Image (cartoon, rainbow, N blue to C red):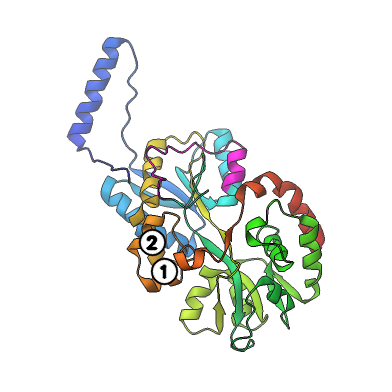
Amino acid sequence: MHRIGSISPVTRRTALKGAAAASALLGFPAVLRAAPSQMVVATGGGKLEEAYQKSVYAPWTAKTGIKIVGAPNTAAKLKAMVEQKAYEWDVCQVAAEFAAQAAKQGLLEPLDYSVIDKSKLLPNTAHEHFIMSDVVAYHIAWNTKNVKPGAEPKTWAEFWKASGRRGLWKRPFQTMEVALMADGVDKDTLYPLDVDRALKSLDKIKASTLFWNSGAQSAQILIDGEVEVSATWNGRVHDPKRAGAPVDYHFNQALFVSDAWAIPKGAPNKKEAMQLIALAMSAQGQADFSKLIPYGPTNTAALALLDAVTLAALPSSEANFKKGAFLDVNYWADNGAKVGPMFEKWVL
């Protein structure tokens, strides 16, 4: 992790005065600036932000004295900020597939990997303009009252054949990948997606599928028994299962997705933003995060800092990671505008 030093107020004032005087003698304007008193980090909110407040923001403020203020990470806001150069965020935490798209649109700063250590990261998680911060599993889950022990679907092909009603996300990304796995495509050879094959696979179960719109809904329809089996994200069913709700899940053929850290293009506090991301991506920062929410670290050095019980619930643990495959964020950045409408037309 990049070490961040602190400067006393007197030392900072002296340094600024000295720099100004030297610049005046040389005929150049002074360019040094004081560190900000606060920074704004945009996230999706909820439990994710609560975990970051404890694992990243509090240690950051303790080291630097810079307060972190949260904000919602709306896509339209990012685009407007950059285009108008009216910055409200210093750092944003967004879905990695959105970060890939924003990078293609020129909305993100290149990351400084001399500050952010990427040496221990999982393959293909450190990109020029964003860094994937966690591993989340879109996987098979089931209602334990309606599905007898041993009868739960172990693969997407079995999920497709399950009796009763099933649930899938009403979005093309992730849903089309599992449709291909259900049709026999290996998890490691999904891309480029065979869109027609995916839609034909979905045709087989359309009449018996409830297409849900949010993570909260995906968990609730399982717990209530409205569906027998459903695709969902591991963070949505982890706590209900621990609390005794009639729900269970596994990581076999999981599709791994990620959130990502990024910096709006032209954001004024770029130096501090890089340092904040470096702290968040450190082994300790990632381990502390995964202790609070069951999303796996992308920094593999963090795994050694976690106990066996915590590791068992994490998609990127050694035992679970080999069972699934990553969603290709660059595929969706390049093809989402074409494939998305095809899926939406199919749904309707």
Magenta residue check for 96: no
Q: How many residues crowd around disc 1 within 10 Å: few (fewer than 14), some, or many (20 or more)?
A: many
- The answer to whether residue 170 is seen in the rendering is no
Mark 2 lies on a secondary structure that is helix
Percent x, y of residue 209:
74, 74
Residue assigned mark 1: 311
Q: Is residue 209 above or below residue 66?
A: below
* Marks 1 and 2 close (CB-CB < 8 Å): yes
Q: Magenta span: helix, strand or loop, mainly?
A: loop
What is the spatial separation of the Cα atoms under label 1 and label 2, in whole angstroms?
7 Å
Q: What residue is drawn where x is 78% and y is 73%?
A: 205
> Left or right: where does residue 321 sit relative to residue 340?
left
Q: Nearer the viewer, residue 106 or 66?
A: 106
Q: How many residues crowd around disc 2 within 10 Å: few (fewer than 14), some, or many (20 or more)?
A: many
Q: What residue is drawn where x is 19% and y is 27%?
A: 14
Q: Mark 1 vs mark 2: which is more N-terminal?
A: 2
Q: What residue is drawn where x is 64% and y is 88%?
A: 146
Percent x, y of residue 311:
41, 69
Q: Is residue 279 above or below residue 255?
A: above
Quarter-of-image position of residue 220 = bottom right
Quarter-of-image position of residue 222 = bottom right
Percent x, y of residue 288:
35, 61
Mark 1 residue type: Leu
- The answer to whether residue 280 is seen in the rendering is yes
Quarter-of-image position of residue 348 = bottom right
Mark 2 residue type: Leu
Magenta residue check for 104: yes
> Left or right: where does residue 14 sit relative to residue 316?
left
Q: Nearer the viewer, residue 106 or 180?
A: 180
Report the magenta residues as a range: 99-120
Q: Is residue 270 above or below residue 249?
A: above
Residue assigned mark 2: 303
